[in-house]
Amino acid sequence: DAGVTQSPTHLIKTRGQQVTLRCSPKSGHDTVSWYQQALGQGPQFIFQYYEEEERQRGNFPDRFSGHQFPNYSSELNVNALLLGDSALYLCASSYGRGGAFFGQGTRLTVV
Amino acid sequence: GNSVTQMEGPVTLSEEAFLTINCTYTATGYPSLFWYVQYPGEGLQLLLKATKADDKGSNKGFEATYRKETTSFHLEKGSVQVSDSAVYFCALGISGGSNYKLTFGKGTLLTVNP
């Protein structure tokens, strides 16, 4: 079992650009959540996808959007990148009320 | 709103010392509580969880008890090892349907010296 896999592992983008991050959930998991972790901080919830729909959303602007595919994998899109979007983006998958399993994350740097 | 407060780090201990990392929470409803661990350069790993008051979660020698009366979920280990050096996050989960939205504390860096 490969667990939760995220791609790419590192990414450098220019302010104003758009970025897409990808996540494949752990086998058997149907729910994907995305978190942003700034340096030295705890992860902040962005949104959660279940049955290809956004089910819950944290306090993030509409520049942050996502998608879930029929195979449960997911994408996080961020438009009009700001320097403050630089962070580690974590994907977590879960099934029912079991604990969330996290991927290794994508380190996004906006310059 | 929901929030988690955990003790400020860093915490530095000698091998075989006793560990306590304090965690308190504020939540509407009846949250589940979690401890996650993050090793350098890695994602978060679920360490233990408790889903209702007075439950005790345990794993790899770590323990935490869900105390509703004090809104706390302190992490303890009787004898730490160098390999326990990592950042520890306390989190609460509110179910939105069948799955949790997690709210994390800021994390506590633990360093264990030989």
Image (tube, coloured by chain):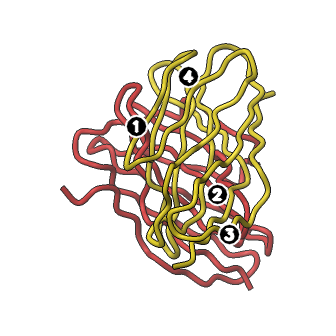
Mark 1 sits on what residue? A31
Dot 4 and dot 1 within a common chain: no
Question: In which quadrant of the rendered view does residue B59 lie?
Answer: top left
Would you call the spot at circle 2 few (<14 residues within 10 Å), some (14-19), or many (20 or more)?
many
Q: Are marks 3 and 4 in contact (CB under 8 Å)?
A: no
- Tag 3: amino acid: Thr
Toward the left, the furthest residue is A1
Residue B12 numbered tag: 3
Q: Nearer the viewer, residue A16 or A108?
A: A108
Q: Are marks 3 and 2 in contact (CB under 8 Å)?
A: no
Toward the front, the furthest residue is B16
Looking at the image, is B114 positioned above or below residue A89?
A: below
- Rendered location of residue B5, percent (x, y): 78, 42
| Tint applied to chain B in the drawing | yellow
Name the mark nearer the viewer: 1 or 3: 3
- Rendered location of residue A30, percent (x, y): 33, 36
- Tag 2: amino acid: Gln
* Distance in Å between CA atoms under marks 3 and 2: 27 Å
Question: In which quadrant of the rendered view does residue A45 lie?
Answer: top right
| Tint applied to chain A in the drawing | red
Residue A36 numbered tag: 2
Dot 1 and dot 3 within a common chain: no
Badge 4 element:
strand
Dot 4 and dot 2 within a common chain: no
Mark 4 sits on what residue? B96
- Tag 4: amino acid: Gly
For the point 66% across and 61% down, the residue is A37
Name the mark nearer the viewer: 3 or 2: 3
Badge 3 element:
strand
